[in-house]
């Protein structure tokens, strides 16, 4: 009888763990609900009451038309719930939120990432949720789904010429960090030997404490394989500004 009770307790504990990890990690305060009237682009839609919603924590994958069509097929004329840590509209009046269909436990963002129809933005303060979103993207990348099928979505840091045409776009770049240099209040994580032409990630001094806490101190990145994500800017060579810890990921390390 004692063994049976122990098994029941173990089973109950496993149920609790299952509901507090994984997809349930992306669970925040309710921000309202509504019915989707129209999808505007790959991460924005309008509710029938006029509110515009932006899918938080993801960015459109290259080939936005296909991503927009996928989002429309998923959301149009559907009832949805909104969750998030902050419902303050952005400068365009769009409310950022995690979006849930009907009684779904996981957000639409997770589904889009799993299918390769979106990229994780790296902007998610909650670590558990960020880990889930990053894992979903990694699964699609490994299985070559959606945008990852062609093998061109992940840019090689050693080929800055392939990144230059993408100025103003959100890009994921991977490569070996050759050096880290500080100039004033900015750290330059250099992936090329010629810093004036090669690809680099730039980090403000105010980000250092957060990165050190996450085990990503800039100097520690030297000679390691690193993946960075963000909006490409042109300052000498192509640059990505790091303003969230989630924009940097060590590759092949646990």
Image: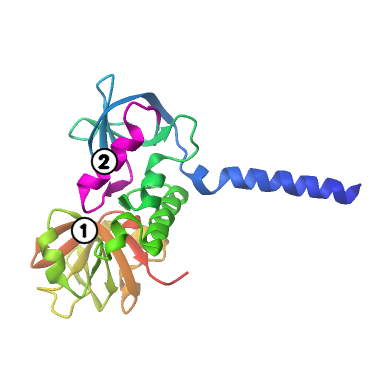
- In the image, residue 219 sits, relative to residue 36, either above or below, namely below
Q: What distance separates the C-alpha of mark 2 from that of mark 1? A: 30 Å
Residue sitting nearer the eye, 73 or 195: 73
Q: Quadrant of residue 33?
A: top left
Q: Magenta stretch? A: 55-81
Question: What residue do we see at 35% from left, 37% from top?
Answer: 74
Q: Residue at x 10, y 73 (%)?
A: 197
Please name which of the two marks, 2 or 1, marks the residue nearer to the observer: 2
Observer-nearest of 77 and 192: 77
Q: Which mark is residue 69?
A: 2
Q: Is-magenta flag for residue 65? A: yes
Disc 2 secondary structure class: helix
- Magenta residue check for 25: no
Q: Residue 195 or 58: which is nearer the viewer?
A: 58
| Badge 2 density bin: few <14, some 14–19, many ≥20, Cα 10 Å | some
Q: Which residue is mark 1?
A: 241
162 vs 209, left or right, is left
Q: Earlier in the sequence, mark 2 or mark 1?
A: 2
């Amino acid at each position: 009888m004692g063994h049976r009770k122990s098994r029941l307790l173990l089973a109950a504990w496993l149920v609790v763990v299952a509901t507090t990890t994984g997809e349930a990690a992306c669970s925040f305060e309710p921000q309202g609900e509504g019915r989707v009237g129209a999808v505007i682009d790959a991460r924005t839609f309008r509710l029938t009451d006029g509110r515009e919603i932006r899918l938080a924590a993801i960015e459109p994958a290259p080939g936005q038309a296909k991503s927009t069509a996928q989002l429309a097929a998923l959301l149009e004329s559907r009832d949805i719930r909104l969750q998030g840590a902050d419902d303050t509209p952005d400068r365009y009046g769009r409310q950022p939120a995690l979006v849930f269909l009907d009684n779904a436990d996981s957000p639409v963002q997770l589904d889009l990432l799993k299918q390769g129809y979106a990229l994780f933005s790296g902007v998610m303060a909650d670590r558990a949720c960020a880990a889930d979103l990053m894992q979903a993207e990694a699964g699609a990348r490994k299985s070559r789904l959606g945008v990852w099928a062609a093998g061109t979505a992940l840019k090689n840091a050693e080929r800055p010429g392939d990144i230059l045409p993408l100025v103003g776009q959100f890009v994921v770049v991977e490569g070996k960090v050759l050096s880290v240099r500080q100039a004033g209040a900015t750290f330059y994580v250099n992936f090329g030997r010629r810093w004036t032409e090669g690809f680099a990630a730039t980090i403000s001094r105010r980000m250092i404490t957060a990165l050190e806490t996450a085990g990503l101190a800039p100097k520690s990145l030297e000679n390691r394989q690193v993946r960075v994500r963000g909006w490409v800017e042109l300052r000498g060579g192509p640059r990505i500004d790091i303003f969230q810890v989630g924009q940097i990921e060590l590759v092949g390390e646990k």
